[in-house]
Amino acid sequence: MAAFRNLRNFRGEAKVSSWLHRIAINQCITRQRRAKVRSEAPLDDETEKDAASFATPVEVSPARVVEGLERTVAVRLAVNSLPLELRQVIVMKEFEELTFREIADALGLPLSTVKSRLYTALRQLQMRLQKFGNEAA
C-alpha cells in the first residue's frame, strides 16, 4: 500500500527494486516506533512466570474502563467526522506517527499546508470532543 501511495513520488532515478526496498525499510522503522510507543512485548515468557500480573489492577474500576471505551469511541467519531483532507493529515501524524515531511511527500503537499491542516484538524477535534464532554455530563 505504501508503494502504491507513493507511486507519484518515484522519479525514476533509481531502480524500482531499490525504491521498493527503501519503502519496506521505512515501513519497518515506523512499525518499530509504534511498538515502542505502545510498549508491545511478547507475552510468551510472562504467561507462565506470573499469571497474576495479568489481573486487573485494583485502581482500574469497571467505571474507568467504560469511560476509556467511551472516550475512544468519541475520538473515533470525531476523527471520522473531519473532512477528508484534515482526517488524512491527523491519521498520518497522530496514528501512523509520520513526520510532517513524510506526510507532505505522501500527499504531494507543501510542508506548510500539512502543518496548517494538522493545526486546523486538532482545533476541530478539540471543539467536537468538548461538545461530547458537555453532552456526556
Image: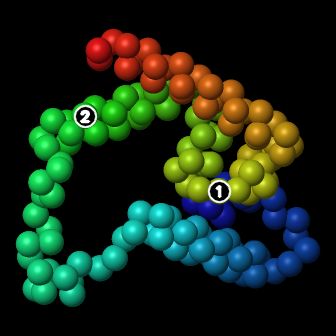
Position of 106 compared to 93: left or right? right
Quarter occupied by residue 111: top right
Q: Residue at x 81, y 36 (%)?
A: 113
Give residue 98's mark: 1
Residue identified by numbered label 2: 67
- Residue 9 appears anywhere in the view: yes
Q: Earlier in the sequence, mark 1 or mark 2?
A: 2
Q: In the image, is residue 59 above or below residue 32? A: above
The one of 133 and 98 positioned closer to us in this rendering? 133
Q: How is the image coloured?
A: rainbow
Position of 104 compared to 128: left or right? right
Provide residue 52's location: percent of width, then percent of height.
8, 72
Q: Residue at x 37, y 29 (%)?
A: 74
- Residue 31 appears anywhere in the view: no
Provide residue 77's location: percent of width, then percent of height.
41, 28
Q: Amino acid at mark 2?
A: Glu
